[in-house]
Image (cartoon, helix red, strand yellow):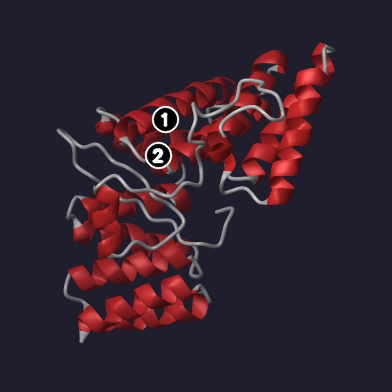
Amino acid sequence: MSRTQILIVVAAVVLVAVMFFLPKVVVNEEDKANFAKGGATEAGHSEDDGHDHGATAEGGPADAHMTASPEQMMELATARAKYNKTTDTQARMRIASELAAAYATASKYDSAGYYYQVAAEARGGEKSYKKAGDAYYEAFTFAATQDRAAELGGKARDMYAQVLKNNPSDLDAKTNVAMTYIASTNPMQGITLLREVIASDPNNEKALFNLGILSIQSGQHDRAVERFRKLVEVNPNHVEGTFYLAVSLANTGQKEEARALFTKVKGLSNDPALAASVDEELAKLN
């Protein structure tokens, strides 16, 4: 994972099985309730149409970048101005990548995806499309509504399709595609893709983690124990895997092992939010 904070998948069953994802934190019951009502972090998407499509440095609603620092806003303004003023095609594509990176730094991942896509479609290349897909996927994980998740998930899949066309063995891209399908009206396609990833790489940490989370969400706690136990065998210091193995063990009545693993989690991370979640889980075991 690219960041040290905790990744959690929060599911809401709509009709068949529509999943929403709120990453980077361990979610408690109050957070789950708030999310179910439609709340979500502002990070990851702009509050306008998602990107300014080449607006001027001063253009766009002021609240579109409320979460960006003054330094990040200045970087964005500079990159947008350069992009708007440049007429040379090659230079414009290079600046599009710079602008995308500035948006990503400011956690405006939908806008980052848009400009990475502009650059990718101009010059092609697996790496360019991967950057666009990753940015759209990051925005997808922050989507606050089903429609927004569907839109961003679709864009991520389009970009990853270009990656997988040239490199079918890119299991990271394939796993992300799977998760976008799980958040769609066709979740079984996502499950199938995750199983294909595991078939190709039984030790794939990302696929094991996501399958474990999905097992928890579907109430298959024994299956979740199996997935997370395998994950921590592959990576004994996997913080999220250890935490959710403990959760799964607790859900199957194996309280002593769960307690030991929750204690281990505290030694693996100094994240105060995680420590609070561990304490909450330990209290349930008493």
Task: Give the image quarter of residue 251.
Answer: bottom left
Please state which amino acid type lies under the numbered disc 2: Ala
**Viewer-closest of 11 and 107:** 107
What residue do we see at 40% from left, 69% from top? 242
- Tell which tag, 2 or 1, sits nearer the viewer: 2
Secondary structure under the numbered disc 1 in the rendered image: helix
Q: Is residue 166 visible?
A: yes
Q: Which mark is residue 153?
A: 1
* Amino acid type, mark 1: Gly
Q: Nearer the viewer, residue 32 or 194?
A: 32
Q: Is 35 left or right of 56, judged from the image as shown? A: left
**Mark 2 — residue?**
143
Image quarter where the C terminus lies is bottom left
| Residue sitting at x 61%, y 20% | 53
Look at 22% across and 73% down and name the residue there. Answer: 250
Which of these two is toward me, 56 or 6? 56
Q: Which residue is drawn at the image coordinates 39% and 54% (left, top)?
A: 209
Give coordinates of residue 100: x percent, y percent: 67, 33
Question: Residue 233, labelled with which disc?
Answer: none
State the SS at label 2. Answer: loop
Q: Quadrant of the N terminus?
A: bottom right
Q: Position of residue 230 (x, y in %)?
A: 38, 61
The earlier-in-sequence mark between 2 and 1 is 2
**Label 2–label 1 contact, CB within 8 A:** yes
